[in-house]
Amino acid sequence: MNRFLDISSVGIEFNTDSGTFRALDKVNLSIKQGEFVSLIGHSGCGKSTVLNIVAGLLEATEGGVILEGKEVNTPGPDRAVVFQNHALLPWMTVYQNVELAVKQVFKGQKSKSEIHDWIAHNLELVHMSHAIHKMPHEISGGMKQRVGIARCLAMQPKVLLMDEPFGALDALTRAHLQDSLMEIQNDLGNTVIMITHDVDEAVLLSDRIVMMTNGPAASIGEILDVDLPRPRDRLALSESPEFNQIRNRALRFLYEKQKFPGGGSRAKKPRLEAVDGASESKSASAAA
Ligand SMILES: Nc1ncnc2c1ncn2[C@@H]1O[C@H](COP(=O)(O)OP(=O)(O)OP(=O)(O)O)[C@@H](O)[C@H]1O
Ligand SMILES: [Mg+2]
């Protein structure tokens, strides 16, 4: 197997006022180049902690992360992170926000005009060419998120790390951005790890869905392979028995095998569709 990114026996403990808290224990995951992997699990289980360890923002207490044969333990442009809230610099235009990242990565390698073309190209990928000179406060939340994605893509990272990138957006904007991300990933072959609370989003976008157990000492519970052909069409898939079967397996894991800690009342339980049914796919947001 092509082992591009290896998360090996990762565990982490945090020091808290009430003593040591073990958030993760023995997390093992190998990711292939070009693979799209979603991390899903109840709130507080440790998804962001896993992502932040891969990003080099947190240091594992045990185990480690190997990317293309090298251990990573500091942040680097080879692992760009898209956060739930864009994190654009408010005093810079859309163009300048992307330029900052591009200059950081390609300084001395690309000429001025190549840098300009590269910024324009990446903003075009996320359909933001019309607003390159706008300030962040002049554009919508979905547009800011597009710029955040363009900024990360423009760094040509080995791995794109996304922590609930569409979580703060309305359903329609989220659907548009999911489609854009699928197109881009299809064209560029990016390796992606994306955290989501939305089971439908995970099935639509992923090659594999990694489902985490509840903490403390959270680990990987089950991994679902999503063998649906690409390109994927959300409307056609909602009628597809295969899609609904995978979706139901993810929902069963979350709502039967790994109930929300404390009784599950915080999680709105979505309806499980008949596994072989062609019934309309309801939103399966597993927001906890
Ligand atoms: N710096 C820290 N110090 C102490 N505990 C922490 C720290 N960071 C995270 N934790 C704890 O580790 C656990 C996992 O947190 P994490 O943010 O990874 O969860 P998550 O799965 O991303 O949750 P959500 O879906 O709500 O974003 C939680 O119990 C959290 O309280
Ligand atoms: Mg999180």
Image (cartoon, rainbow, N blue to C red):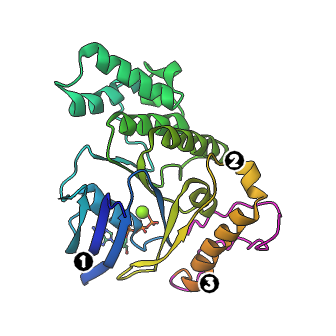
Element carrying mark 1: strand
For label 1, the crowd category at 10 Å Cα-Cα, with few meaning under 14, some 14 to 19 and many 20 or more, is: some
Mark 1, mark 2: which one is toward the viewer?
2
The percent coordinates of residue 156 (x first, y second) are 33, 38
Quarter of the image where one finds residue 179: top right
Q: Is residue 93 visible?
A: no
The residue sitting at 27% across, 45% down in the picture is 78
Numbered circles on residues, count: 3
Q: Which residue is mark 1?
A: 13
Mark 1, mark 3: which one is toward the viewer?
3
Give, as a single range, the part of the protein colored magenta: 261-288
Residue that extends furthest to the top in the rendered view of this protein:
113
Disc 1 to disc 3, C-alpha distance? 28 Å
Predominant SS of the magenta segment? loop
For label 2, the crowd category at 10 Å Cα-Cα, with few meaning under 14, some 14 to 19 and many 20 or more, is: few
Disc 1 to disc 2, C-alpha distance? 41 Å
Disc 3 to disc 2, C-alpha distance? 29 Å
| Label 1 close to label 2 by CB (< 8 Å) | no
The percent coordinates of residue 284 (x first, y second) are 67, 64
Q: Reply above or below: 221 against 54.
A: below
**The residue under label 3 is which amino acid type?**
Glu
Quadrant (top left, top right, bottom left, bottom right) of the C terminus: bottom right
- Point out which mark residue 233 bears: 2
- Point out which mark residue 256 bears: 3
**The residue under label 2 is which amino acid type?**
Asp
